[in-house]
Image (cartoon, coloured by chain):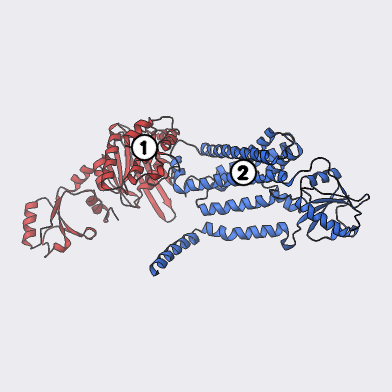
Amino acid sequence: MAGRLKRIYAVFRARNLEFVRDRGTLGWNILLPFVLMLGLYFIFGGASRPQYTVGVVQQADDIDTVVHPFLETRYVRFVPERDLDEAIRKVARHQLDLLVRFDPPARYWVNPSSPKGYFVELALHEKDPAGEIVKAEIKGEPVRYVDWVLPGILGMNMMFSCLFGVGYVVVRYRKNGFLKRLRATPLRALEFVVAQVASRLVLIIAITVAVYAGTSWLLDIHMVGSNTALLAVAIVGAICLIAVGLLLSARVTSEELAGGLLNLVTWPMMLLSGVWFSLEGASDWVIAASKLFPLTWMLEAARAIMLDGASLVDVAPELAVLGGMTAVFLAAGAAIFRWGPR
Amino acid sequence: MEPVLEACDLVKRYPGVLAVDHLSFAVREGSCFGLLGPNGAGKTTTVEIIEGVTPATSGEVRYRGEPAGRRFREECGIQFQHTALQDFLTVRESLELFRSLYDRQADIDEILAECSLVELQHRDNRKLSGGQRQRLLLAVALVNVPRLVFLDEPTTGLDPQARRNFWELVERIRARGTTVVLTTHYMEEAEILCDEIAIMDAGRIVSQGNPRSLLEHRYPNVVIELPIEDVREGFGELEHRVVEARGVVEIPTSDVNTSLRRLAGQMHALNRLRIRQPNLEDLFLDLTGHSLRA
């Protein structure tokens, strides 16, 4: 028994020494949770973060709570909406949980497939027992949450595959000497990078198309626009995400450090790029921060095509931003790329 | 004849360490040139500078009279001391991957046969023994029909039989006229394979030439070895040196009969006495004051 404990302790101690002496990894393991917690605190405002978002049809910039007691409901973020049609579209797309107009005739709109909309509607009824605010119909077929969230899930899967599938692998190649072996051949860095991008692109697009086709068939996914346009967005977005992976792995030699860096990028993207929920009504700086992430632009373009029937011309600005980001990430990655461990 | 490869005043500094100290040498076409030295002498750093995978602090590498560039990469094959191949690829697939990176391409079947890998060609490269793996790494170095091959400690960690098999393989490559640059700390390997050696210590070349010429020039004598515990009395006027690492006293002599008579007269126990030719390890010891295996 004592011998077994001694052996366990020896391996335990050696692993601990390995970990704490890898300063980069240790630093990231300490820094990453801090950064994430601070980020989440500032983004979502700590414990009192509103759970629901309700649009209020009005022209004024500020919400005046004296207008109706519903406006004093806790954990609900009320955002002014000037354009009624646009606001109703947001309800249909799950960007708003409910839309209310207090000016006569008082009305409210809710997406019947929205779980959050259901609870906010209950809260509204509690503050309006007389039923003075009348429920209005959303014209056309409302978008289900699954229709809204599918691009987010596919995008998230692409993000993880592109970043970890490229970033982590390049770091492993560098660490085990495979990159050094390649460097001794006529292969150029650009050729290696292009091959990595192409390989991951083909794989992730094939997987994404298969998942999309399967879910569309099984769940009858809402698709208004062109599948070709959607494929183009997926390709441009995937190349940009792969470029992020290459940039993050350009110099790193520790797989644990690479994991920390990749998590530092993927977690904010998962929370701020609109994968699971809309950032409608969030503070300006949160919206601005979300625009730094390629996933945000890819999902906006994908949802515009799938839910609103946008064409490639309509999403050209998003594609242009993704293209610009790709150029910057690839240029920076190539500038600092290192073949060997040191 | 112009040398195929020239290292010109190479210097490599790391913080606090001068790994390669103004090192120059030239390699003749078709020869086997050996860099010999203990671990840490700077052999691997030197060849990695020449191979272009480690930048030199200063100095120049010339291939066929020109600065080593794209032509050099196309025409040289490299077997690194430590390297990894891509996971999940078979032996054949690994060779095909590297072959496709070059303009000049060898026949994969010929290479498999030459390196005794035919029966292993469909095996995952991670599931090879040490000797099989070294043969695969050499095969990878041959996929471009190289005119110059670098072998960095190719037999380290191999058993004696696998080592001898590898030497035969290197001899076959040389027989085709391929120039070989070999780094090793095995003196026997250098003596068998190399036409010319450069003995390195602390980043410098301390001696260079044909192995046999170097030994004959420095050692006209043979060496009598006596285990330390068999020594009974002093050695009188007999020249000798104690080699603690191997537990022997060495007595160099040009007259074995006379030396043996004197040793017997000094009452040493001679049952375990051994007479041998001086080798590169003796040369290294003399030149640097420490053993090759240090």
What type is the residue that disc 2 sits on? Met
Q: Looking at the picture, does residue B216 appear above or below residue B15? A: above
Could you classify mark 2 by the number of other residues whose Cα lies within 10 Å: few (under 14), some (14-19), or many (20 or more)?
many
Q: Is residue A199 visible?
A: yes
Q: What secondary structure is found at the residue carrying circle 2?
A: helix
Of all chains, the one bearing label 2 is: A
Q: Position of residue A248 (x, y in %)?
A: 57, 48
Say which quadrant the C terminus of chain B sits in: bottom left
Q: Position of residue A267 (x, y in %)?
A: 63, 52
Could you classify mark 1 by the number of other residues whose Cα lies within 10 Å: few (under 14), some (14-19), or many (20 or more)?
many
In the rendered image of this protein, which colour is used for chain B? Answer: red
For residue A159, which numbered disc appears in the image?
A: none
Tell me: A210 left or right of A253. right
Q: Looking at the picture, does residue B134 appear above or below residue A35? A: above
Viewer-nearest of discs 2 and 1: 2
Using the rendered view, name the quadrant where residue A325 is placed: top right
Using the rendered view, name the quadrant where residue B217 is placed: top left
Q: Which chain is tinted blue?
A: A
Q: Position of residue A139 (x, y in %)?
A: 84, 41
User: Pointer 1: what residue?
Assistant: B139
The residue that appears at 62% across and 51% down in the rendered structure is A265
Of all chains, the one bearing label 1 is: B
A203, A209: nearer the viewer = A209
Q: What secondary structure is found at the residue carrying circle 1?
A: helix
Q: Please report contact status of discs 2 and 1: CB closer than 8 Å, yes or no.
A: no
Q: How many marks?
A: 2
For residue A158, which numbered disc appears in the image?
A: 2
B274, B199: nearer the viewer = B274
